[in-house]
Amino acid sequence: MEWFTAPDYWLSRLIFQRALAAVYLVAFLTAALQFRALLGERGMLPVPRYVARVPFRDAPSVFQLHYSDRFFALCSWSGCLVAAALLAGVDGLLPLWAAMLLWLVPWLLYLSIVNVGQTWYGFGWESLLLEIGFLAVFLGNDRTAPPVLVLFLLRWVLFRVEFGAGLIKLRGDPCWRKLTCLDYHHETQPMPGPLSWFFHHLPKPLHKVEVAANHFTQLVVPVLLFTPQPIASAAACLMILTQLWLVLSGNFSWLNWITIVVALSAVDFSPVAAPPDLPPAPLWYEIVVLAVTALVLVLSYRPTRNLISRRQIMNYSFDPFHLVNTYGAFGSINRIRQEVVIEGTADEVPRADSDWREYEFKGKPGDPRRWPRQYAPYHLRLDWMMWFAGISPAYAGSWFGPLVERLLENDRDTLRLLRRSPFPPDSPPRYIRARLYQYRFTTWRELRATGACWHRTYIREFLPPTRLDVVAQGGRAHRR
C-alpha cells in the first residue's frame, strides 16, 4: 500500500524517538531513586499491601505476580538501561520486529510501575507517557518509512492534550474567561521555578495577553494539526514555543517536555534533510498497524465523549493499560498559596518555645530566603503531594501519617527525598509537628530589603506534636 508510509517524516520520527527515549530515561530514574520511601516494602504506601487488595485486571503489572524492593529496583534500572539504548539509537540497528519489541519493553515496565504507584503516580503525564510510548512501538525504524496512521494517532494525542486543557479552562475557573488567572498562577502553582517570581511580577496587562494567547494555542491551533503542510508544522511549532514558555515559568515534571516530544512528530523536517531510500513496509507490519489503529479509534469513543461533555473530567484513564486517556490542567486556580511546614524537636516535653527545627524539602517552598530551583523534567513526587496537602488535609490522608512516622524514625530512604534533615542520623526527633502557612511572593522592595523571595504568615496547626513510642518488637518502631 503506497499510502501506508510517509517517507518525508523519517527525520521527524528519528527526533521524536530519541526525545521520547530521553523522557523515558528521566521517568525510570525518578522511579529508581524514590520508590523505596514511597512504595517499597517499608514505604509510605507499600506495593505489597496495594496488590493484595487490587486484582490484576484492574491494575495489570508485573508486580502483581511478584514484588520485592530488589525486583522493583531491577525493573527501574532496567528501564533506564533500555531507555539509554533507545536514546543511543540501538533500535535503528535491529530488524523491524526486534526494534518494536525493544520499544515495548519500557512501555510494559513503566505501565507496571504506574499501575501500582497509587497516589504518587496519579498525574496526567504518567498516562500521557504511556499512551505515547505505546504508539511509539508501532512507529518503525530505519527498515521502513513511518506509517501514516501512527503519525495521525500521535497528532490525535496532541490534539486531546491541548484542546482538552483549553476546554477545561473555559468550563472551569471564571478567571480564565476574565483573563486574570495568571495574576495568581505563578505564585500558587505546585512547584515554582527560578523565574516564577519574575513571571508573577510581570505587568497585569501582559498577563492578560498570556492568557489570551494560551486560549488561542489550546483551542484554535490544535485543529490546524490536521491540515496540510506547512500549516500543520507551523501549528506544532507554535505549541512547542508555548510549552517552552511554560518550562521557563515553573516546574511541571515532564508534562511540557512530553508535549513537546509528541509535537515534534507533527513537524515536517523534509526541507532540512531529504529522506533516504527506505524499503517498503512488510505485510505483517501493515496488518499490525491497521489493527492497532482500529483499537485506538474504538477506545477513543469515551475520551471523545468526555471532551465534548459539559461535565468534562481531566487526567483520567478509561482502560487499565492507559491506551487512550483524557487530559487537562489547571481548570481552577488557587488565589492563595498554603504550605505545610514540618518541624521536629528533641525536647522531652514539646512546648511552644521548644527548639523546633524545620525540615527542608528539595523543591517545595520552605525557608522564605531560599530561591526556587529548577528540577523539571525530574519529578519530586513527595514535594508535589505536599502542595496538595496544603490545599486540603484530605489529599494527605493516606500518606502523611506514614511520612511522620518515618521522620520520627530518621528513616534513611525517606530522608533522601528531602534536601536536609535538621537531626543527625543517630539522633531522631522525639516529636514532629506540622504547621500551615500562607506564602506569597515578596515585592521588589521586600526582596531588596530582606533578600527573601517569599513572605509567610502562620495560619493554624496542621498536625499537633506527635511522637513515636518505640517498642522493642522485631526491631521495628510502633505507634501506640
Image (cartoon, rainbow, N blue to C red):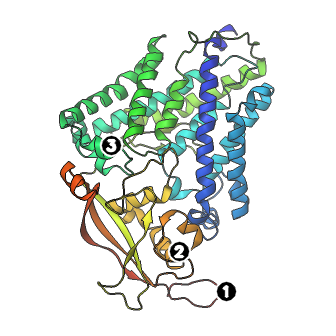
Circle nearer the N terminus (3, 1) = 3
In percent of the image, x 77 and y 22: which residue is there?
Answer: 284
* Alpha carbons under labels 3 and 1: distance apart: 48 Å
Provide residue 339's location: percent of width, then percent of height. 33, 62
In percent of the image, x 50 and y 56: which residue is there?
Answer: 381
Provide residue 372's location: percent of width, then percent of height. 38, 52
Count residues near mark 3 (Cα–Cα under 10 Å), then give few for <14, some for 14-19, many for 20+. some
Task: Kindly identify which residue carries mark 1.
Answer: 474
Circle nearer the N terminus (1, 2) = 2
Is 310 placed left or right of 276 in the picture? left
Count residues near mark 1 (Cα–Cα under 10 Å), then give few for <14, some for 14-19, many for 20+. few
Provide residue 370's location: percent of width, then percent of height. 36, 58
Provide residue 478's location: percent of width, then percent of height. 55, 84
What kind of residue is marked 3?
Answer: Gly
Task: Kindly identify which residue carries mark 2.
Answer: 406
Name the quarter where the N terminus is drawn. top right
Depicted 426 relative to depicted 168: above or below: below
In percent of the image, x 20 and y 37: which residue is there?
Answer: 203
Q: Nearer the viewer, residue 29 or 327?
A: 29
What kind of residue is marked 2?
Answer: Arg
- Secondary structure category for the residue under label 2: helix
Farthest residue toward the front?
Answer: 449
Residue 331 is tagged as: 3
Task: Please say if the residues under marks 3 and 1 sit with CB atoms less than 8 Å apart.
Answer: no
Task: Please say if the residues under marks 1 and 2 sit with CB atoms less than 8 Å apart.
Answer: no
* Alpha carbons under labels 1 and 2: distance apart: 17 Å
